[in-house]
């Protein structure tokens, strides 16, 4: 595979991240690539072959985008890059690194394999969320991992009802609800007791947050459904919808939040030999094979 124009994204506040970006730039220079540095980090590096660019510009112009950092950096970039036909690969400088496959110790050999076509391309779907007030759209955003309806105050219950494709499912008093993609099933949803979904599953998980009933359990639904959350008017005004913990949309009592699959997909590039179950074993500390 030939990647002529490559975008670099990351945060240089960590010295080791800067070190990894230097290694990637050196690799790309050896291959005479056009290098687009995301504008927030462009000032940290010098060279006439380094061009500052926005995430949108990288999406429009790059054949490949390399994100150096943790899953949070990848998710922030993914919400923009998913709108463009650009492959994205991550160098892990975070904690868990479910989405950033390349080890900082193996940048050169792993990128060499990717540029030789020894890679696996995987597409992950995103969510889009809209907040309506009296059937009038108030705000909208997208999410890679999850959409979370919650109270603005910590440990504060709220009342809402959930519908799937306009069919009433349940009403609930709880701290909120997590709607997660398969990608997000190993993130916030997992810590709330939700199931792990294989990335290829076309499904969503609905995970209640501290529900005020023992019968409330996470459920898995078709990802092509529209999930609606109608907030009761008895709630206080301090309500929110969070997208990947990055973007917050305000919600008022009586509002309706609609969540559906985003038409755009994130194209994740993995090194050849990538195994989702191997990632789970390594990141979650699962046991090794007995035989």
Image: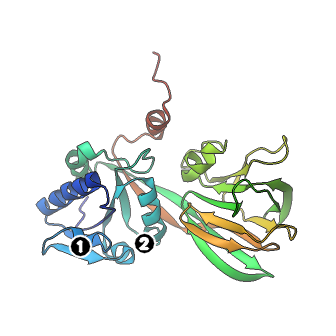
Asked if one can make out residue 224 in the rendered structure from this viewpoint, the answer is no
Asked if one can make out residue 152 in the rendered structure from this viewpoint, the answer is yes
Task: Spot the residue most to the bottom.
Answer: 136
Residue at (53, 64) in percent of width and height = 246
Is residue 178 rendered to the left or right of residue 280? right
Is residue 118 rendered to the left or right of residue 151? left
The percent coordinates of residue 215 (x first, y second) are 85, 42
Task: Quickly name the residue at label 1.
Answer: 43
Is residue 259 rendered to the left or right of residue 54? right
Assign a secondary structure to mark 1: helix
State how many labels appear: 2
**Quadrant showing the C terminus:** top left
Assign a secondary structure to mark 2: loop
| Neighbourhood count class around disc 2 (C-alpha, 10 Å): few under 14, some 14–19, many 20 upward | some
**Quadrant showing the N terminus:** bottom left
The percent coordinates of residue 154 (x first, y second) are 69, 56
179 up-or-down from 38: above or below: above
37 up-or-down from 276: above or below: below
| Neighbourhood count class around disc 1 (C-alpha, 10 Å): few under 14, some 14–19, many 20 upward | few
Q: Nearer the viewer, residue 135 or 120?
A: 135
Q: Please name the colour scheme applied to the rendered image.
A: rainbow
Q: Which numbered disc flags the more N-terminal residue, 1 or 2?
A: 1
Is residue 49 rendered to the left or right of residue 40? left
| Tag 1–tag 2 contact (CB < 8 Å) | no
Residue at (46, 21) in percent of width and height = 289
The percent coordinates of residue 181 (x first, y second) are 60, 55
Residue 84's tag is 2
Q: Nearer the viewer, residue 185 or 262?
A: 185
Alpha carbons under labels 1 and 2: distance apart: 25 Å
């Amino acid at each position: 595979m030939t990647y002529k124009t490559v975008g670099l994204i990351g945060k240089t506040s960590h010295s080791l991240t800067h070190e990894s970006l230097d290694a990637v730039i050196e690799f790309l220079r050896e291959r005479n690539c056009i290098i687009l540095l995301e504008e927030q980090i462009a000032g940290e590096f010098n060279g006439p072959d380094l061009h500052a660019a926005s995430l949108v510009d990288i999406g429009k112009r790059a054949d490949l985008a390399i994100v150096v950092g943790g899953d949070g950096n990848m998710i922030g970039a993914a919400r923009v890059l998913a709108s463009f036909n650009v492959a994205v690969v991550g160098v892990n400088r975070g904690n868990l690194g479910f989405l950033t496959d390349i080890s900082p110790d193996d940048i050169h050999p792993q990128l060499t394999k990717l540029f030789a076509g020894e890679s696996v391309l995987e597409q992950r779907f995103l969510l889009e969320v809209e907040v309506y007030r009296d059937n009038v759209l108030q705000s909208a955003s997208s999410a890679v991992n999850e959409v979370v309806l919650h109270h603005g105050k910590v440990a504060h219950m709220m009342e809402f009802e959930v519908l799937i494709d306009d069919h009433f499912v349940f009403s609930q008093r709880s701290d909120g609800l997590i709607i997660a993609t398969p990608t997000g099933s190993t993130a916030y949803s997992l810590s709330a007791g939700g199931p792990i979904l294989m990335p290829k599953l076309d499904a969503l998980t609905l995970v209640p947050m501290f529900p005020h009933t023992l019968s409330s359990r996470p459920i898995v639904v078709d990802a092509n459904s529209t999930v609606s959350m109608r907030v009761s008017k008895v709630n206080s005004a301090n309500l929110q919808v969070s997208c990947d913990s990055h973007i917050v949309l305000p919600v008022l009592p009586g509002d309706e939040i609609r969540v559906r699959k985003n038409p755009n997909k994130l194209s994740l590039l993995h090194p050849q030999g990538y195994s989702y179950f191997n990632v789970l074993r390594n990141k979650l500390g699962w046991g090794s094979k007995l035989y």
